[in-house]
């Protein structure tokens, strides 16, 4: 059985004390990823926030969308789930 590995990224933090992501064997799951600049601010519009997170429209991921109250002026949030070959 594989061991769980927490993934932390320099300069990336959550309000809660959790890692940026976690890997268990081939499964990778992220915490919430929000559209923020390095100074902690976010763009004002949904289109600008999506473009900040995924600048190349040809490589944006498949996704669901749902309405949710998010902090501040955040209009979009993403979580990653991936299977990675070992």
Image: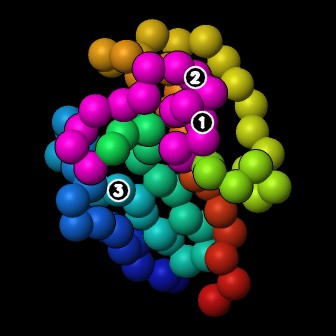
Marks 3 and 2: CB-CB under 8 Å?
A: no
Q: Earlier in the sequence, mark 3 or mark 2?
A: 3
10 to 2, vertically: above or below: above
Q: Which residues are magenta?
A: 38-53
Name the spot of residue 10 as percent of width and height, x first: 22, 66
Residue wearing tag 1: 50
* Residue at image point 69% right, 84% down: 85
Name the spot of residue 65 as percent of width and height, x first: 70, 25
Marks 2 and 1: CB-CB under 8 Å?
A: yes
- Residue 32 seen: no
Asked which secondary structure carries label 1, the reply is: helix
The colour scheme of the drawn protein is rainbow
Q: Earlier in the sequence, mark 3 or mark 1?
A: 3
Residue wearing tag 2: 46
45 to 24, vertically: above or below: above
As rendered, which of 62 and 56 lies closer to the eye? 56
- Residue 2 seen: yes
């Amino acid at each position: 059985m594989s061991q769980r590995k927490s993934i932390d990224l320099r300069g990336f933090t959550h309000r809660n004390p959790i890692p940026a992501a976690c890997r268990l064997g081939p499964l990778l799951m992220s915490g919430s990823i929000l559209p923020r600049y390095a100074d902690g601010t976010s763009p004002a519009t949904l289109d600008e926030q999506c473009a900040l997170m995924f600048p190349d429209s040809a490589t944006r991921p498949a996704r669901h969308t749902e309405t949710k109250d998010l902090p501040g002026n955040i209009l979009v949030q993403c979580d990653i789930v991936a299977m990675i070959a070992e």
